[in-house]
Amino acid sequence: MSLHAFVDESRRNNTYLLAAVLVDPGDLARMRKALRRLLFPGQRELHFKKEKTDRRKLIVSKLVSIGATVHIYTCDCSAGEEIARQECLIALINDLVDLKTRRLVLDSREERNLHDAQTIRTTLGKRPSYSKITYEHLDSTHDELLWIPDVVAWCHGAGGDWARRVRPLVAKETAVDKWSR
């Protein structure tokens, strides 16, 4: 199977969360169309923290109904958010190689994208040459599938009822210990 992964992050106190939605190429168009239907007229993207509570509930319900599969990576970020992100990214890349993922799309962080690129190259360099992952950074207005990890990371990080609501979407959760490598 040739999966595509779309990645966004969230932070709650000293916990950094990296969420990746995994999508089969045959489901890309269907899922994008379903997500576009959630936009209000004139709205260019869904950004979960900007939505009101009732709308958040509707969005999560729709995501559950379209059957997204999300992996979440968490790491303590008291030593620095960028360190935590890169540790989560290493764990994600290793999982994506094992899953034979072919495309990785990360929500752009502008100049900080260079940190991701370096980590991806270094991590893939340690793997056999059969890894064929291509990656890019995009603004979330350029691919609707980046909205899913935004929603799931936010909800998972919020805990309580929000975490319960997205639980059907979370196929895997990995707590990354930056000291164990």
Image (spheres, rainbow, N blue to C red):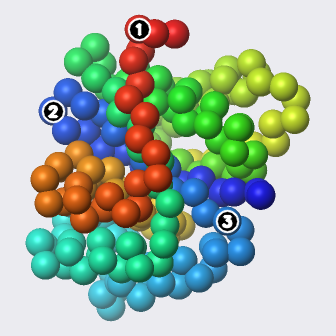
The answer to whether residue 136 is above or below residue 98 is: below
Question: Which residue is identified by label 3?
Answer: 24
Question: What residue is rendered at 47% in x and 26% in y?
Answer: 86
Closer to the camera, 5 or 143? 5
Q: Secondary structure at mark 1?
A: loop
Secondary structure of the residue carrying tag 3 is loop
Task: Give the class, few, some or many, for how many residues have Cα within 10 Å of label 1's Cα (few <14, many ≥20).
Answer: few
Q: CA distance from mark 3 to mark 1?
A: 33 Å
Q: Are marks 3 and 1 in contact (CB under 8 Å)?
A: no
Position of the N terminus, as image quadrant, is: bottom right
Specify the label residue 179 is tagged with. 1
Q: Contact (CB < 8 A) between labels 3 and 2?
A: no
- Residue at image location 71% in from the left, 68% down from the top: 25
User: Circle 2 — which element?
Assistant: loop
What residue is pinned by disc 2?
13
Q: Marks 1/2: CA distance?
A: 20 Å
| Mark 3 Cα shell of 10 Å, populated few (<14), some (14-19), many (≥20) | some
